[in-house]
Amino acid sequence: MLFGKPATAEKWITEAVENSYYRTRAEDGGFVFLTTVAITERDGIMTLTSAHDSQPQGFAARLMSIPMGLLFKGVARNAILQDLNDIKAAVERV
C-alpha cells in the first residue's frame, strides 16, 4: 500500500540472458520503473544484485517525485528485502 492505494504495477520483461540477468519495465502514475536483476558466481559464491530506476514522465510526475523520493525509499527497501528473503527461502528449499 502506498498513500492508501495498492502499490502494484504490471511489469514486463524487456531483456533477458539465461543464467545471467533480466530487465523489466513497468509504467504507472506518470512514472516508468526500470529494474535489472542479475546473478553472478565467483569462487562458488552466488550473488544476486538488483538495480532500480524510477523515471518521472512529465511535469506533474516530476513534482510528485520530490516528496516521493523520501517516502518511497523506505517502502521500496522493505519490498526489495521481502523479495530477496522470498528468493532465499525458495533457493534453500531446493
Image (cartoon, rainbow, N blue to C red):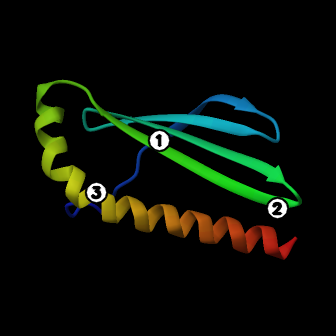
Residue 90: quadrant of the picture: bottom right
Instruction: Tell me whether the residue at label 3 lies in contact with that at label 2, contact meaning CB atoms closer than 8 angstroms.
Output: no
Residue 17: quadrant of the picture: top right
Sooner in the amino-acid sequence: mark 1 or mark 3: 1
Mark 1 crowd level (few <14, some 14–19, many ≥20, 10 Å Cα): few
Furthest residue to the top?
58
Circle 2: element type: strand
The structure residue drawn at horizontal position 45% and vertical position 63%, both measured from the top left corner, is 79
Q: Relative to 77, is 82 on the left or the right?
A: right
> Looking at the picture, does residue 40 appear above or below residue 89?
above
| Residue type at tag 2 | Ile
The structure residue drawn at horizontal position 57% and vertical position 63%, both measured from the top left corner, is 83
| Residue type at tag 1 | Glu
Q: Nearer the viewer, mark 3 or mark 2?
A: 2
Residue 81 x %, y %: 51, 67
The residue that label 1 is drawn on is 10
The structure residue drawn at horizontal position 46% and vertical position 44%, both measured from the top left corner, is 52
Q: Nearer the viewer, residue 77 or 10?
A: 77
Residue 69 x %, y %: 23, 50
Q: Relative to 47, is 34 on the left or the right?
A: left
C-alpha distance separating marks 2 and 1: 32 Å
C-alpha distance separating marks 1 and 3: 18 Å
Sooner in the amino-acid sequence: mark 2 or mark 1: 1
Mark 3 crowd level (few <14, some 14–19, many ≥20, 10 Å Cα): few
The residue that label 3 is drawn on is 72
The residue that label 2 is drawn on is 45
Q: Nearer the viewer, mark 1 or mark 3?
A: 3
Sooner in the amino-acid sequence: mark 3 or mark 2: 2
Circle 3: element type: helix
Instruction: Tell me whether the residue at label 1 lies in contact with that at label 3, contact meaning CB atoms closer than 8 angstroms.
Output: no
